[in-house]
Image (cartoon, helix red, strand yellow):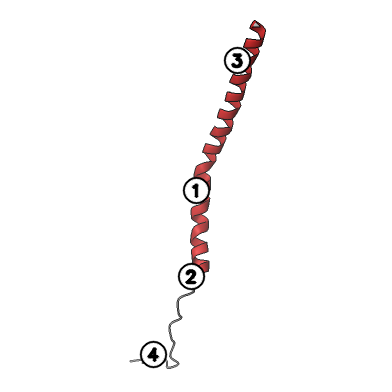
Amino acid sequence: MDGTAIIVILAVAGVASILLFALKGLLDQIPDVLDSAGRARDPWQRFKKPPPPAAEEDDDPPMGA
C-alpha cells in the first residue's frame, strides 16, 4: 500500500510538471502571436479599403517665368 501511494504521488507530480511546462510554452508564444496579428492586420485593412481616387492631372505644363 505504501509503494502504491508513492507511485500515485509521483505520477500526479509528473503530470502537473508536464502541464506546467506546456502552459509555459504556450504563454511564451503569446507576444509573438500578437505581434504577428498586428503586422497582418494593417495590410489586410489596406487590401479591403478601396484605393483613394487619383488626383486629376492637367495636360498643360506649368507656367514658367
Q: Measured from the top left, where is residue 40 in percent x and y?
A: 53, 57
Q: Measured from the top left, where is residue 17 in percent x and y?
A: 58, 24
Pointer 1: residues within 10 angstroms few (<14), some, or many (20+)? Answer: few
Q: Amino acid at mark 2?
A: Lys
Q: Amino acid at mark 4?
A: Pro
Distance Cα–Cα, label 1 vs label 2:
23 Å
- The reply, left or right, for residue 29 in relation to residue 53 is right
Q: What residue do we see at 49% from left, 73% from top?
A: 50
Residue bearing the label numbered 2: 49
Say if mark 2 contacts mark 4, CB within 8 Å: no
Taking the view exactly as shown, the residue that stands out farthest to the front is: 1
Residue bearing the label numbered 1: 34
Residue bearing the label numbered 3: 9
Q: What residue do we see at 46% from left, 81% from top?
A: 54
Residue bearing the label numbered 4: 62
Q: What residue do we see at 60% from left, 20% from top?
A: 12
